[in-house]
Image (cartoon, coloured by chain):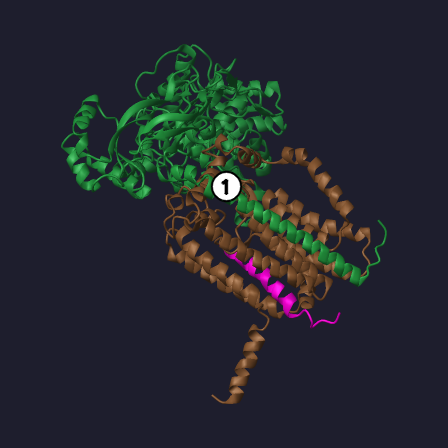
Chain colours: A green, B brown
Amino acid sequence: MNTQLRNPQQERWDFQWRLRLLWLLVTLLSLLLLCRLLWLQVISHAYYHTLAENNRISIVPLVPNRGLILDRHGKVLAENNYSYTLEINPAQSADPETVIDQLATLLTITPSDRKLFQKMRDETHGLAPVTIRSHLQEEEIARFSVNRYRFPGVEVQARMIRNYPLGTSASHLIGYIGRINESDQERLDDEDLTDAYRGTNNIGKLGIEGHYESLLHGTTGSEQVETDAAGHGVRSLQRIAPISGSDLILSIDAGLQQAAEQAFGTHRGALVAIEPSTGEVLAFVSQPGFDPNLFVDGIDQDHWNALNDSPDKPLNNRALRGQYPPGSTVKPFMALAALTLGRRDPHTQIFDPGYFAFPGSSHHYRDWKPGGHGLVDMHLSIVQSCDVYYYSLANELGIDTMHDFFTQFGLGQKTGIDLDGEVSGLYPSTAWKRKRFKQDWYAGETVISGIGQGYVLVTPLQLASAVAALANQGVWMRPHLVRAIRDSSSGITRSINPEAVRTIPLKEADLALIRDAMVDVMRPGGTASQAGAGAPYLIAGKTGTAQVIGVRQGEKYSESQTAERNRDHALFVAFAPADHPRLAVAVLVENGGHGGVIAAPIARQVFDYYLLGRAPKAAVEVPDEQVDDGPH
Amino acid sequence: MNKSTMALIRQWRERLFAALDPTLLQASLVLTLLGLVVLYSASNADPFKVLGQVRNLALAFAAMWLMAITPPHKIQRVVFPVYVVALVALLGVALFGEVSHGARRWLHLGPVRIQPSELMKLALPLALAGFFEWRGKTLRWTDFLVAAMILLVPVLLVVRQPDLGTALLIASSGFYVLYFAGLSWRIMGGLFLAALASLPLLWHVMHDYQKKRILTLLDPTQDPLGAGYHTLQSMIALGSGGTLGKGWLQGTQSHLDFLPEHTTDFIFSVFGEEFGLVGEVVFLIAILIIITRGFVIANEGSTPFARLVAGTLSMTLFTYTFVNIGMVSGILPVVGVPLPFLSYGGTSLVTLFTSIGILMSVHHHRKLVKQ
């Protein structure tokens, strides 16, 4: 097409012509709309009139069955049970208060039932049926049925109710489902899932239930039902069956999980047990737990307050979200860093007079052992948990080197486990401090980082996966909880493959050196010798104690004189059998005191159960004679 | 009051209102009042919703008046800057937009939240018209190529959000300018064929929910709870309304909450259910009066810019009306398009009345500019 010389007159004419043409199109399309509206509103009016007025055909969502959650041996951790509930539809019934009073003469209705009803009624603005009683007994149903005519708008409904047969066991890991609340609804709207959740009342809130919601929920079906004048279904016209959610098979061993929980007794804390070669989590404990069944129908205020206000913080997922100083459990990693980077010969002996001090400074970084350990080499420094050895090592390595080394083991980083809400912990560096506090890093901060104090914070999960990497020749596997997913309609089980995230460049000889030292920790002369006594397999372990309150210069920490909540946290990390690791464990006991005394025996019971099939005895108790300054 | 005061008042009234074309003004007022009546019912008799819309209307009328008193050649001066601003805002959305409902459409500027694609609906056709005016007497094929770039860049940005519906509407308004500017029939035929040929490709890049909407259109009963639900319920609302409708505030479909978005995109079904075919015909006639008037104004426009703008804006008004009613009556897929004059919402109302203001300006200043 070449240059068009435009004659204004010609152009005006052309424009006019084009206008007319479009106007014709506008007219035609308007007529098309009119025809469509005519067809809908005049010709098919009767049909749509019936649909709207009689509500003759109603579309009923068919809610899919939620997928089950099973442990690695097929033991059920979350299931769906039929349960009969009594529901009041405030729109059709008399004044609900009066109705409930009358119902109370027929069946037991507790004050907490009433409170829950009130809460749900407020949430649904009285537009939807609200449960007044769940888990009705046969006899109660019979009694109500006889009197049903007295209660318009009150109905017995059979509903699938989520049940967690293990109760408080593994509650943080499994999580729970609860009523879809306003923020859930907003999220569903945002993800364009409102239709997919039509008819569904509950949604996964925490743990596996929350993280795997999309798999567990399934696909909602629908049914077009012809109804009679009273709104009761007469016949089904078209049915699209719902597709049940997928079943999740966890890597958790429910027996091991319960053994570990039992070993905690009344102590608060967390334990994570990982298979080093795969990253599969076999036990994931946060004590105390809570009963997830309480949340399924909506939790009432009293139970909620009890859980929420308890000083033991049972709703806190300590394994995933608790951040603690790792204390001396970092020492094997520190030693490994020195070896790997060639910064200190394992045979070099350091003299420990009981403290470390910078030249010309009077500030003493104390060893846990008054008077010190004397001459200490690397092996002994791990076995006896010598602090001064690591104060000086940290000073030689520098914080940024330590940061880079520990980061490879996943400290201070989210592990990416298949649970929501994980926190990252913290491994400091000079860059971090400059960014966070706009301050320079002090050498003294490096020194205390060397024994896992100061800014360093880890989650028990991070610690466990770091130890698992140590056991796995430096291959850091991403910890995960779901081992396989079983499609409910096809029955096909799809395994989740282990994910090797990175291989830390380590030398076999160095690893062996550290492992040998950790084995000797469990032997006479080591800080966890009691816990290691009589084990028919080799354990490689390391104790740790994390300070909760600071101890001033020249003062002495005394456990017996410190309030329980301010006592040190006890830590222990280990893997076993040391020569062929099958399980890596990290244990944290809040305010438990000394790692070797309280945390290590818990790990021992977990190993015994897993490796020997031996059920734990009673909970670990602190022997009376061991209450003052012990090994850190 | 003495004579001079009277004269002064008359003079001011002249100055203030002379630019307001009576036909456009009256039809708009009728539609606006109808909109408020329907909105009151659609919002389940929520006076605050109606008050909110009245506030939007005040803003919209101000915009209309401002446009009407501004001669086209002055409007023409700002169209490029406005286009550039809208384009930058679209880029901003692509880079730091807020994600809502799985799409990136909103941009936060301090306390204000804007949807730049709405601005582009108006900015693009104006800029294109300005471009053709600027190129003047001779139009080369390269000019059409540049025009295509001006058109395609924002459209592709909106497609990426993803908001296919709005992108198509913006593209259509740009296309009207090309059409009115005299794009050759051969090229338009070619484009049409190209569009047909690219349909399978388009299907390939469409999101699942978009495919679902198309499939739903072919058979709404396929997925009565999901994508088909809205269309089906809307058709039931219209169909059960019949010839005369169920009466104001009497719509069962809308008041029993069967209808989605019943104050915005689906307000026509509330209207149709309560006012019936008769009400709808009144609405359509009023809209057609505005469009026809717009075409007449376009025809008498003094400059190419004025003509292109008037023709395009009238045609765009029709497009929105057609697409929205087509959607609620189940002959077009569900796209988020507000119905002019009836749907609740500040942005669309201001855009609409700005367009009408521009039409009035073209009419009022038809003889003021030298040929």
- Residue B358 forms part of the magenta stretch: yes
The quadrant in which residue A244 appears is top left
Q: Which residue is mark 1?
A: A39
Q: Residues within 10 Å of mark 1 (few under 14, many from 20)?
A: some
Give the residue drawn at x 56%, y 68%.
Answer: B22
Q: SS at mark 1?
A: helix
For residue B188, above or below residue A528: below
The quadrant in which residue A76 appears is top left
The C terminus of chain B, quarter of image? bottom right
How many marks overall? Answer: 1
- Residue A199 forms part of the magenta stretch: no
Q: Nearer the viewer, residue A48 or A618?
A: A48
Where in the figure is residue A100, as x and y percent of width and height?
19, 37
Q: Main secondary structure of the magenta part?
A: helix
Q: Nearer the viewer, residue A247 or A283?
A: A247
Q: Which residues are magenta?
A: B345-371
Q: Can you see residue B2?
A: yes
Q: Can you see residue B99?
A: no
Q: Nearer the viewer, residue A550 or A48?
A: A48
Q: Amino acid at mark 1?
A: Trp
Give the residue drawn at x 39%, y 57%.
Answer: B48
Where in the figure is residue A367, as x and y percent of width and height?
45, 33
Find the residue positioned furthest to the left: A105
Give the residue drawn at x 34%, y 31%.
Answer: A227
Where in the figure is residue A513, as x and y percent of width and height?
56, 19
Q: Nearer the viewer, residue A330 or B314?
A: B314
Where in the figure is residue A433, as x and y percent of width and height?
54, 45
